[in-house]
Image (cartoon, rainbow, N blue to C red):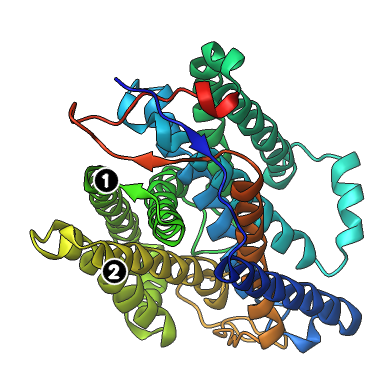
């Protein structure tokens, strides 16, 4: 197979600088929102003593979970030996680092006292999943950085397989740790389930691949580079499988809760009587975020149009945010049943469904994390060779091999 050249984008057009300026402005708005909340206190947000994780955590957890899943494209090439995906791997690694950086920025700035992270980094409670995640996140940055080095430096290519295998295992651990934040949280009735860890792993596959498809198509469309339909065809088939698998795990999770007597009231709340939460679950997560994208991607006509593929991927991302909202905020809104079968009331809001309405500073902080990831990607593809000059199948019906000969010269 013929070799392929990786080139950085020119990045001199008005469109590029306009896009960079737009995401840069959103980043500054996010930082300003964090300062506003830190200066005035969380009383200016919609969060309370009952709902301590708000919309910033929705964006943060989405970015962290998707960061793990977006690396799946590179893993398919290096771990499972599918050479078709090798030219797609560098962008996969870049997106993984960028999205994790954006997600962690939101988490740190949402603490109210971000300077206390120094304590979290110097004193560890190893019974806490949060302490373990500090090692998982920093390890992910290091391992994926080394993985990118082995892919992009010709002399290091022989180590790419080993680095990819380590990155594959580590990202599974990272997503398991993220899911376990909720799975180990016995103080909330909505959580405390062993299913959450594997469910988060499967969800990461669909979230990450949806983001990857959007970035890949946009990058090649805006730079005028050739992108073969066969590439989009492979990725969309994978997305169908991942979205269906995530939906299956969600169904199993709720059916399991319905089987447990003590969880019936919570399931009734989240699926039927909970106001905005059933709406986001059935319409946002299930219908628009899962069933409609599967129908679009599987359709013989719509699935061939890139605009419809992008729409399907965008719906998966929006459905993911709806799922995170229902999981994180809906789980806190439902009151903990201290005495099942009994009515409990006190001045501490026992037995009361907790209201939550996100404030504008919270929303901008969450969007700021997304913008940080976008800024990192935009600058990286301009300065370094993450994107092939063209992606086509040519005569062989396969993508050319992932070689950096003339690109590295």
How many badges with numbers are in the image? Answer: 2
Q: For residue 318, which quarter of the picture?
A: bottom left
Indicate left or right for 364 with 110 as reference.
left
Residue 31 visible somewhere in the drawing: yes
Instruction: Give the position of the C terminus as an image quadrant.
Output: top right
- For the residue labelled by badge 2, is the local secondary structure a helix, a strand or a loop? helix
Q: Label 1, on which residue?
A: 228
- Residue 286 bears which disc, if any? 2
Where residue 30 appears, as percent x and y from the top left, is 73, 74
| Mark in the foreground, 1 or 2 | 1
Residue at horizontal 43 percent and vertical 85 percent from the top: 276
Where residue 248 appears, as percent x and y from the top left, is 26, 53
- Residue 287 bears which disc, if any? none
Mark 2 burial class by Cα count in 10 Å: few <14, some 14-19, many 20+: many
Residue at horizontal 66 percent and vertical 45 percent from the top: 383
Where residue 125 appears, as percent x and y from the top left, is 80, 40
Residue at horizontal 56 percent and vertical 57 percent from the top: 63
Residue 53 visible somewhere in the drawing: no
Mark 1 and mark 2 lie on one chain; the one further toward the N terminus is 1
Mark 1 burial class by Cα count in 10 Å: few <14, some 14-19, many 20+: some
- For the residue labelled by badge 1, is the local secondary structure a helix, a strand or a loop? loop
Indicate left or right for 14 with 319 as reference.
right
Cα–Cα span, label 1 and label 2: 31 Å
Q: Nearer the viewer, residue 95 or 114?
A: 95
Where residue 256 appears, as percent x and y from the top left, is 31, 55
Instruction: Give the position of the N terminus as an image quadrant.
Output: top left
Q: Nearer the viewer, residue 346 or 242?
A: 242
């Amino acid at each position: 197979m013929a070799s392929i050249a990786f080139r950085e984008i020119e990045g001199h057009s008005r469109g590029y600088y306009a896009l960079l300026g737009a995401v840069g402005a959103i980043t500054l708005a996010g930082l300003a929102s964090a300062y506003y909340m830190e200066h005035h206190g969380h009383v200016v947000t919609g969060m309370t003593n009952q709902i301590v994780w708000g919309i910033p955590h929705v964006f943060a957890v989405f970015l962290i979970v998707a960061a793990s899943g977006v690396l799946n494209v590179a893993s398919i090439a290096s771990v499972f030996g599918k050479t078709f995906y090798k030219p797609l791997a560098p962008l996969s690694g870049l997106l993984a680092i960028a999205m994790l950086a954006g997600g962690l920025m939101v988490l740190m700035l949402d603490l109210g006292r971000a300077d206390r992270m120094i304590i979290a980094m110097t004193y560890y409670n190893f019974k806490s999943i949060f302490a373990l995640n500090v090692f998982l996140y920093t390890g992910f940055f290091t391992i994926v950085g080394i993985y990118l080095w082995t892919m992009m430096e010709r002399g290091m290519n022989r180590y790419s397989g080993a680095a990819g295998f380590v990155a594959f295992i580590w990202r599974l651990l990272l997503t398991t740790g993220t899911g376990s934040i909720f799975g180990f949280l016995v103080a909330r009735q909505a959580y405390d389930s062993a299913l959450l860890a594997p469910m988060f792993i499967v969800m990461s596959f669909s979230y990450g691949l949806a983001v990857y498809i959007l970035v890949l198509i946009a990058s090649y469309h805006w730079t005028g580079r050739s992108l073969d339909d066969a590439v989009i065809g492979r990725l969309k088939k994978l997305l169908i499988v991942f979205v269906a698998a995530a939906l299956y795990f969600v169904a199993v999770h709720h059916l399991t809760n319905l089987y447990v007597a003590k969880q019936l009231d919570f399931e009734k709340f989240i699926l039927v009587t909970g106001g905005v939460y059933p709406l986001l679950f059935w319409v946002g997560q299930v219908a628009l975020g899962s069933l409609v994208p599967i129908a679009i991607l599987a359709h013989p006509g719509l699935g061939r149009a890139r605009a419809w593929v992008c729409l399907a991927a965008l719906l998966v991302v929006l459905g993911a945010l709806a799922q995170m909202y229902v999981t994180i905020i809906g789980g806190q809104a439902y009151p903990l049943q201290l005495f099942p079968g009994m009515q409990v009331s006190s001045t501490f809001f026992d037995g009361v469904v907790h209201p939550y309405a996100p404030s504008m500073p919270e929303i901008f902080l969450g969007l700021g994390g997304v913008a940080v990831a976008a800024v990192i990607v935009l600058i990286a593809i301009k300065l370094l060779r993450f994107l092939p000059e063209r992606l086509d199948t040519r005569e062989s019906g396969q993508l050319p091999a992932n070689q950096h000969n003339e690109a590295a010269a």
